[in-house]
Amino acid sequence: MSVRISDSTVRRLSLYLRMLRGLRVRGVELVSSSELADRAGATSAQVRKDLSLFGSCGKRGRGYEVDALTGTIEEILGLSRVWRVALVGVGKIGTALLGYEDMLDRGFRVVAAFDIAPDKIGREIFGVTVSPLSEVESVVCEKGVEIAIIATPPATAPEVAVMLSEAGVGAILNFAPTRISEIDYVPVRTVDLVLELEGLSYLLTSRRRNGDD
Amino acid sequence: MSVRISDSTVRRLSLYLRMLRGLRVRGVELVSSSELADRAGATSAQVRKDLSLFGSCGKRGRGYEVDALTGTIEEILGLSRVWRVALVGVGKIGTALLGYEDMLDRGFRVVAAFDIAPDKIGREIFGVTVSPLSEVESVVCEKGVEIAIIATPPATAPEVAVMLSEAGVGAILNFAPTRISEIDYVPVRTVDLVLELEGLSYLLTSRRRNGDD
């Protein structure tokens, strides 16, 4: 199973999986490509194409078996296991992320947290003890951290990313509003809330400019 | 100035703007296309192409004037003003967003917050009083809310989006881990943290599968 799948396909697989897990909980056994399409903002043809990539075929007039398809997508995405996550920067956003149940529900367990503020170090927040950032290397190793989330101020985020990759973290999710490049094959994804707001600002402004409303 | 700019260009303009604002604060007067490119993960040629779209030309061997270019991009993106934002769902993430200084620094002021929990209604959090969701229509109108952020549980997010668009909100940023379609020309952007983590999970899994590490 060594097909390389594009980012946008991975994204749709995540959305299908979300729906499938919900159906499985409710005991639903079959789902049609059009139901899956609707949830992911795709077409039925796109769904069938995506799923045929790894050999899942629906049965005409019946659809896909929820249980089997859930397992297949979980395996593809590496979600049939729990990932060990560290959080760096226990400010307002960082603290909120430590308590974000949806993350654990979907297979990402925060096992370590780091900060540099003396009043935060040693505190236990949502069951995780905050370690000093200076100990990142030993803690990442001891706890087997695989993915790190950066929620520090933007100015320190790039150097934190370097520290994390040197400590052996495999991938980084960046919440700081700054760009961090991939370091030594450690992939970085950035969630940039203000960038999204600026995108909306542009849409509203250009509509008003063009007299659309 | 009615050029339609693609999402990816808008995104790069946001990143250029971030750098330009920093340079302006530090009193720097000129910036080269390669410096801007570096910050946005683009090439110099791409920067020159983006900026020429709205008539900004660098001077050969000198670069772009920081002050003028900052003003131009702010105007294009609609960021030469402050947007009035409402937040719906004052849970952990919602509360953190209410206190997120970076948002205000960059022109998005939260002027209203909504929840349905009786113990939250009437409380003042980071200077904003939480209103009952049932009053969304009057509060959005009184406070002149233009953009709303949804930070509710996923199950209620789509109906909250409908309420907001009926109340006259112009654009929605969705933080709930569910897809919300555009409603009556109200653009919706989703920031989906777990989806990004799942993308990283896929990358790590496929690398291991292919024996890349």
Image: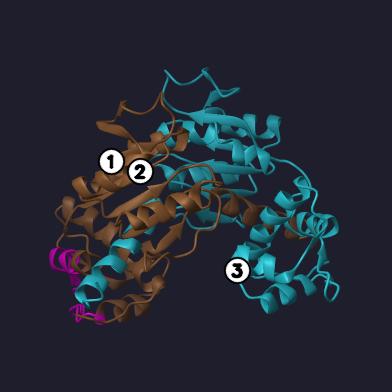
Chain colours: A brown, B cyan
Could you say which is closer to the camera, residue B14 or residue A102?
B14
Rendered image quadrant of residue B155: top left
- The chain carrying label 2 is A
- Gap in angstroms between the C-alphas marked 3 and 2: 29 Å
The residue identified by callout 1 is: A112
Q: Which amino acid does label 3 sit on?
A: Ser
Start and end of the magenta stretch?
A52-72
Q: Which amino acid does label 1 sit on?
A: Ala
Left or right of A1? Residue B190 is right
Q: What element carries label 2?
A: strand
- The reply to whether residue A131 is in sight is yes
Instruction: Give the image location of residue A182, x and y in percent.
Output: 44, 65
Contact between labelled residues 1 and 2, with CB atoms less than 8 Å apart: yes
Q: Residue at x 17, y 79 (%)?
A: A59
- The chain carrying label 3 is B
Q: Is mark 1 on a helix, strand or loop?
A: strand
Quadrant location, the N terminus of chain A:
bottom left
Question: Foreground mark, 1 or 3?
Answer: 1
Residue A87 bears which disc, if any?
2
Residue B8 bears which disc, if any?
3
Magenta stretch: includes residue A67: yes
Quadrant location, the C terminus of chain A:
bottom right
Magenta stretch: includes residue B16: no
First reached walking from the N terminus: tag 2 or tag 1: 2
Q: Is residue B175 above or below residue B139?
A: below
Q: Residue at x 40, y 71 (%)?
A: A7
